[in-house]
Amino acid sequence: MTQLSERNVLVTGAASGIGLLLAERFAARGARTILWDVDAVALEAALARVAAAGGGPAAAYVCDLSDRQSIESTAARVVARHGRVDVLVNNAGIVNGKRLLELSDAEIERTFAVNTLALFRTVRAFLPGMLAAGEGHVVTIASAAGIAAAPRLADYSASKAAAIAFDEALRLELARDAAPVRTTIVCPFFVATGMFAGARTRFPRLLPILAPSVVAARIVDAIEADRARLVLPAFVKSTWLLRLLPVAWFDAAMGFFGITRSMDDFTGRGRTPRS
């Protein structure tokens, strides 16, 4: 099992939403929590909340995950001050919620920079320290939208599908090398953090809009238990079976379960969201 007490746990996108809830739970378990976010004001408030959660000390760093140099310089500061990172939680993400032809090039590029390219950059920064220490855990917060896409999520779904493939390749590389570093991929349905405000579900019992506290608790449990994959709710797993059907049947199933209309009333946070 992955031990969190007295371990350096870094969470990206930690100033709000799932990231903040995760950071609080890690702190309560005695971890030395390291918070990254692009929002300096929200990050300061988040640091106070995490410190109040008890456990080990917490630190915060402003970092723009869409910028390679910002990631590299911030990672270097973290290593210099705290030593290696034991658990890396790549949680930060953005969503635009626009139809394909409404998206600008800048919006598409930023989505992939934060949701996908940042994974490569943070893991390349901190994985060597884990390998040298003989232990570590890399957590990737992806999305059910990376398993089954939806209208108005072309950039988001593609970036999260890439995140799922990234985790899979990393897991297989580590296993082939018998490296003592664990990975966990997390694929939740819509979470009620405000990031997906206005998104809807046709069958709330099968595909509920998830409570943030429940999702955070399940993620921490999965990390501690070294689970390779966490999909929420479990019904999302049926997507892999549905993909065995002819494309027309699969598309009809997505329509029946309401996936193709789930983003029709999306509003988000009224600005570029952050998970």
Image: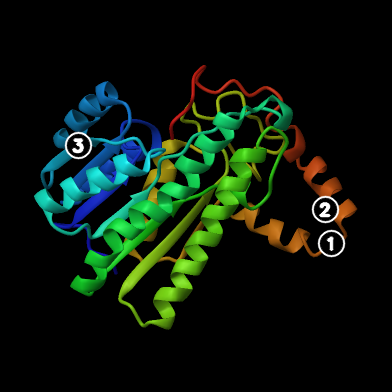
Residue at x 49%, y 24% (from the top left corner) = 272
Q: Residues within 10 Å of mark 2 (few under 14, many from 20)?
A: some
CA separation in Å, label 1 and label 2:
6 Å
**Tag 1 residue:** 245
Q: Is residue 220 visible?
A: no
Provide residue 12's location: percent of width, then percent of height. 33, 42
Amino acid of disc 1: Leu
Give the residue at the far front of this rendering: 69
The image quarter in which residue 107 lies: top right
Mark seen at residue 234:
none
Marks 1 and 2, the one that precedes in the sequence: 1
Query: What amino acid type is highlighted by mark number 2?
Result: Phe
Q: Are marks 1 and 2 in contact (CB under 8 Å)?
A: yes
Q: Please report the residue visible at 38 percent of the width from the left and 56 percent of the height from the top.
A: 139
| CA gap, disc 1 and disc 3 | 47 Å
User: Residue 35: x, y in percent?
Assistant: 25, 40
166 lies left or right of 92: right
Can residue 69 be seen? yes
Identified at 69% across, 32% down, the residue is 152
Quadrant for residue 179, please give it.
bottom left
In this rendering, the label closer to the viewer, 1 or 3: 3
Relative to 4, is 20 on the left or the right?
right
Quarter of the image with the N terminus is: bottom left
Q: Residues within 10 Å of mark 3 (few under 14, many from 20)?
A: many
**To which residue does mark 3 refer?**
60
Disc 3 marks a residue whose amino acid type is Ala
Measured as percent of width and height from the top left, residue 13 is found at: 36, 37
Q: Which mark is residue 250?
A: 2
Query: In terms of secondary structure, where does tag 3 sit?
Result: strand
